[in-house]
Each structure stands twice: as structure tokens, then as C-alpha cells.
Image (cartoon, rainbow, N blue to C red):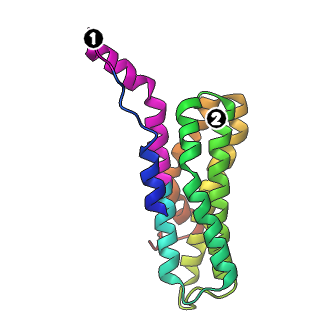
Amino acid sequence: MFAIAITLLVLNLRVPHVSGPHVDRRLLDGLGHDGGLLIGFVISFYVIARFWLVHHRLSVLLRRVDTTFIVLNLVFLAAIVFLPFPTEIIGQYGNTTTGVVFYAAAFVVTAGLSAATWEYALRVGLVDPRVPPSTRRHARVRAAVPILIFGISIPVAFADPSIAKLCWIGLVAQRQVAARVAGGSDPG
């Protein structure tokens, strides 16, 4: 599902069709016009790839699954597959409050579902009991970071959508934040 969602992201990108005189300038203008789509692609690719890594970590630590876990996981995967749609919205309407809020809200929901899946697995004993408490703490903090970053950007978008989008740069520090808050180094 993650690979499909990442692949679908690129379908939003279109090659500008230009001809006639001044092709270089018109092509540059066309690429600049689609700059929002490129930025949306990069951010979404990064975040979906992070979700993929987190999901993989969980799958390695699982010793069993139950029906509730499977349902949570399927709902989370549905949210992942939905993400190319808000990515196109942010690409085309990234300077609007509605576009930024819609995009951020989609990622808050997806991150919340990822966190809920992890938390459920940890609480009901689906995860190998030999997993150390530090790994469990890191998983919880790492899951909270995108919820907080995208969540904070939503009210900021009502004041200034451009500043709200700058909040998302904090996602790059996700591992470092988890290590600092949870204590010690990130176990992976």
C-alpha cells in the first residue's frame, strides 16, 4: 500500500507543454507554476516513507495479531492510500488556508491511526515482550511528532498558510526529538 501511495503521488505531476518562441522561458514558467505540486510531492513522499519505516518496525516486533489489530491496520492503510489526494490539493491550493488545513488534517488523521495501531499492539501484548521499554517509549514519541507538527500547523494556517507549511520542516527532526524526549538514542 505504501509503494502504491508513493507511486500515485507522481501522477499529480505533469510535464508542461510549451512550444513556439521562447521555449526555455515558457518551460521555466511552466515548471515554476507547478512548483507547489513538486513541493507537495517531496513532503508527502518523505512522510509516507517515514510511515512505511515505522510500520515495518512494528511488523518486525509483532509476535501475533488479532482482529482489532487487523482492522486498525486496514484503516491506517486506507488513510495512506488517500494521501495522494490531499497532496494534489496542497500542490494546487497551497497558498490557501483551506488547502493547508485539509492537507495537514489528512496527515494528522493518518499519523493518529499509525499511533493507534502501535499503541494497541503495545497495550494488548501483540509485540514481542523482549522489546525494551526504551524502544516502546521511542515508538510512542515518534508517533506523536507528526501529529503535533501537522496539528500545530492547522491553527497557524488560519493566520498564515505559508508559515503553517514552514512548521512541517520540523518533521525532519522527528528522530532527534524522539531520542531527546524518550531518553537515550533512537533504537532504529
Can you see residue 157? yes
Q: Position of residue 171 (x, y in %)?
A: 52, 51
Q: Nearer the viewer, residue 106 or 78?
A: 78
Q: Is residue 31 magenta?
A: yes
- Whole-percent x, y for residue 133 in the image: 59, 82
Q: Pointer 2: residues within 10 angstroms few (<14), some, or many (20+)? A: many
Asked whether 36 or 18 is in front, the reply is 18
**N-terminal-most mark, 1 or 2:** 1
Residue farthest top in this picture:
21
Residue at image coords 58%, 37%: 89
In which quadrant of the rendered image does the C terminus lie? bottom left
**Residue at x 44% of width, y 29% of height:** 35
* Relative to 11, residue 21 above or below: above
Q: Position of residue 23 (x, y in %)?
A: 27, 15
**What's the mark number on residue 99?**
2
Mark 2 residue type = Gly
Measured as percent of width and height from the top left, residue 62 is found at: 54, 84
Residue 175 visible in image: no
Identify the amino acid type marked 1.
Gly
Q: Secondary structure at mark 1?
A: loop
From what the image shows, is residue 6 above or below residue 140?
A: above
| SS of the residue under disc 2 | helix
When asked about the image quadrant of residue 65, the answer is bottom right
Q: Nearer the viewer, mark 1 or mark 2?
A: 1
Check residue 169 for magenta coloring: no
Chain part drawn in magenta: 18-47
Q: Residue 20 bears which disc, if any?
A: 1
Residue at left offset 53%, top offset 91%: 130
